[in-house]
Amino acid sequence: RGLVELVARTSGVRFDDARAVIAAAGRPEVDRALAHFGWLAGRAARDLVLAHGAWGGVYLFGSVLEGWAEVVDRASFFSGFDGPNPMAAPLSTVPVIQIKHPQAALVGLISQLPK
């Protein structure tokens, strides 16, 4: 929903859902919104790493991410994630990984069950 709202507010074009936005990649107003969304996602991931000390990595998954990953300018994500700031050097060592398993959340939960 956030991607749909971002495109609507920045370009005035309204889409039904994120898949429709992603399908419209290549239109300048959509590409600008996707780049801004990438920067915002990178900034949010950065803030979570810093707040929680998650130096072991950022693991991203989900249906919107799968579509977005096909069209995003990865540089926009990383400019938000480890762009100019006092923590840029340590943040540049944090791995960012896309998980493509269709049941990633369940697999992660199961791995946490006591043995």
Image: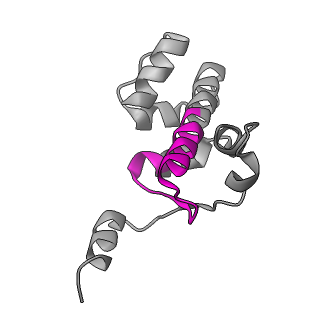
The image quarter in which residue 27 lies: top right
In-front residue for pair 23/104? 104
Q: Quadrant of the C terminus?
A: bottom left
Magenta portion: prevailing SS class: helix
Residue lying furthest top: 12
Q: Does residue 101 lie above or below 32 as drawn? A: below
Left or right: 65 as drawn, with respect to 87? left
Does 19 appear in magenta?
no
x, y (%) of residue 44? 52, 39
Q: Does residue 52 lie above or below 73 as drawn? A: below
Which range of residues does the magenta coloring cover? 40-65
At a point 39% along the width and 50% down the height, the residue shown is 63
In-front residue for pair 94/64? 94
At a point 64% along the width and 59% down the height, the residue shown is 94
Q: Quadrant of the N terminus?
A: top left
The image quarter in which residue 42 lies: top right
The colour style of the image is one colour
At a point 71% along the width and 60% down the height, the residue shown is 93
In-front residue for pair 29/23? 29
x, y (%) of residue 106? 28, 68
Residue lying furthest left: 114
Q: Does residue 94 lie above or below 39 as drawn? A: below
Does 43 appear in magenta?
yes
In-front residue for pair 79/28? 79
x, y (%) of residue 33? 58, 25
Q: Total of numbered circles in the picture?
A: 0
At a point 32% along the width and 78% down the height, the residue shown is 111
Residue lying furthest bottom: 115
Q: Does residue 54 lie above or below 110 as drawn? A: above
x, y (%) of residue 81? 64, 43
